[in-house]
Image (cartoon, rainbow, N blue to C red):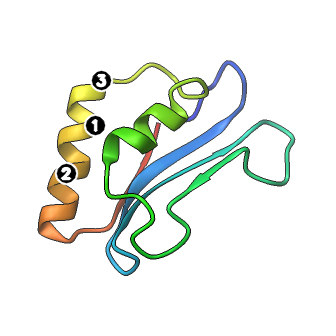
Amino acid sequence: MDNDETGDEVVVGWDSSLETFFAQVIEAGAEEPVVWIGASPTQCNNPDEVIDAVMPFAAKFDRALLLAELLSDRVSDSERVYSV
């Protein structure tokens, strides 16, 4: 989900060890994330929350597909990171 136009790094996923969805956005040239959700246990149980948080920064993506994959990762307890 990285935005090639702006250089922003955008990542979302499911962290099975923390049992939370997460999102992180680091703007081009920045050292600290401008978005960081899901850094603590069970912080975010709603994948829509992480998708909404990264939309202003991410490249275009299929929201329905990403939502389905995030929910699937939680159900299967799989850790996978999507760079959007």
Residue lying at the far bottom in this picture: please name it: 17
37 lies left or right of 6: left
Nearer mark to the viewer, of 3 and 2: 2
- Tag 1 residue: 66
74 lies left or right of 5: left
Percent position (x, y) of residue 80?
Answer: 33, 60
Q: Can residue 1 be seen in this view?
A: no
Q: In this view, does 68 lie above or below 73?
A: above
Q: In this view, does 4 lie above or below 81?
A: above
Compare marks 2 and 1 and give the one earlier in the sequence. Answer: 1
- Tag 2 residue: 71
User: Which amino acid type is shown beneath numbered disc 1?
Assistant: Leu
1 and 3 marks in contact (CB < 8 Å): yes
3 and 2 marks in contact (CB < 8 Å): no
User: Which quadrant holds residue 7?
Assistant: top right
2 and 1 marks in contact (CB < 8 Å): no
**Residue at screen point 85% across, 53% down:** 31
- Tag 3 residue: 62
